[in-house]
Amino acid sequence: MSKLKVLVTDKIDPEGLAPLRAHAGIELVYQVAPKPEELEKLLKGVGAWLVRSETKITADWVTKAPDLRLIGRAGVGVDNIDLPAATRRGIAVVNAPAANTLAAAEHAVALMLALARHIPKADASTQAGKWERGKFMGVELHGKTLGVVGLGRIGREVAKRAASFGMKLVGFDPFVTDAQAREIGIEPMSFLDVLAKSDFVTLHVPGGEKTNGMVNAAALAKAKKGVRIINCARGELIDDAALAEALKSGQVGGAALDVFHAEPLPADSPLRGLPNTILTPTWAPPRPRPRAASRPSSRPRSSISTTRASRRTR
Ligand SMILES: NC(=O)c1ccc[n+]([C@@H]2O[C@H](COP(=O)([O-])OP(=O)(O)OC[C@H]3O[C@@H](n4cnc5c(N)ncnc54)[C@H](O)[C@@H]3O)[C@@H](O)[C@H]2O)c1
């Protein structure tokens, strides 16, 4: 019996690759970020292609892989894969939507704390030999209101953690009923009301027509003055120029961003060098994360959802 050739072109934790290596029926080809001419050769005879978010599987690549039957995405988003092209060829595309939930939620909470306590600035000052005790007092989270936009997997985990800090929770998600939101301790309201009432707002919605640019100049103008915004979801949700203006004017008191329109973040991005802004380099790819990396190969039936059922992002 001929072996199934599995090609992996993004960095995957060794723990995630181990079951593929150990499988007698699989020939594993692990080549991170191959050049186009190299990739074309590698694709010959490939039955399954496993990626994270770095590899872009375009329609062109799909046609260059005649034996391809399965594309696996270690993580949530499938926007690096041309789904219509894969569907036309009858190639199944599978992802691992819950693999990063806790890490993403913890990162959002870490950013919220860092924003509240000015931790990056306090560290930089102390590392530079200063001792500026009074300068970075910040605010307590206890008693503050957190607005959670998107009450899915990550939004709910963030909410749970924020509740343990004694924060009040409000939220917006048009696909979650008011009763469901209240059940998880979140007062449901419109997006603009969330902005108007919240001291901190954390975004956990997918990108798309309805959500791209939802944090724009008009929305920010309705926000509570000094609101702090955390975005670990999609860069496209925020109008960068509007946010930059609002940060400069003080309408927005701080922003902690892990995702951007263009990644890596361009050197001349208007988001760099702004007051009270924390930028992290999208912690997900390319660093290996055992959870995300191991699930698609080790638990294919129970933990992978088909992308046709839900086109989640990242
Ligand atoms: N920074 C990272 O590395 C990282 C890691 C994992 C996930 N993410 C991103 O985090 C986001 C949330 O992920 P998740 O796993 O919680 O997804 P999820 O699908 O579980 O939750 C998304 C929620 O958004 C809601 N939603 C959809 N459209 C909306 C709209 N127009 N307005 C308000 N709510 C809307 C949905 O009803 C759902 O409850 C996604 O954008 C994902 O790409 C980022």
Image (cartoon, rainbow, N blue to C red):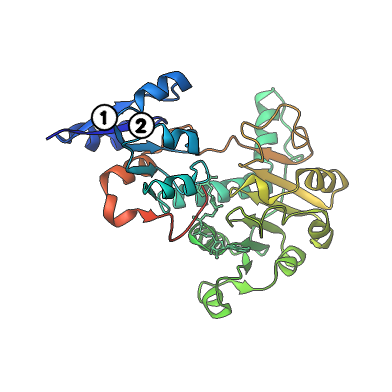
Which residue is under mark 1?
Answer: 28
Residue positioned 42% across, 50% down in the render: 87
Q: Secondary structure at mark 2?
A: strand
**Marks 2 and 1 close (CB-CB < 8 Å):** yes
Dividing the image into 4 quarters, which one contains the N terminus?
A: top left
**Name of the residue lying farthest toward the left:** 1
- Asked whether, in this view, residue 87 is left or right of residue 180, the answer is left
Residue 170 seen by the camera: no
- Asked whether, in this view, residue 28 is left or right of residue 49, the answer is left
Q: Amino acid at mark 2?
A: Val
Which residue is under mark 2?
Answer: 8
Q: Are there few (<14), some (14-19), or many (20+) residues within 10 Å of tag 1?
A: many
* Relative depth, front residue between 19 and 124: 19
Residue 299: numbered disc:
none
Q: Where is residue 55? Give x, y as percent.
A: 47, 33
Residue positioned 37% across, 21% down in the render: 41
Q: Is 71 above or below relative to 32?
A: below
Residue positioned 52% across, 50% down in the render: 313
Question: Disc 2 and disc 1: Cα gap in Å?
Answer: 8 Å
Answer with the quarter of the image where residue 145 lies.
bottom right
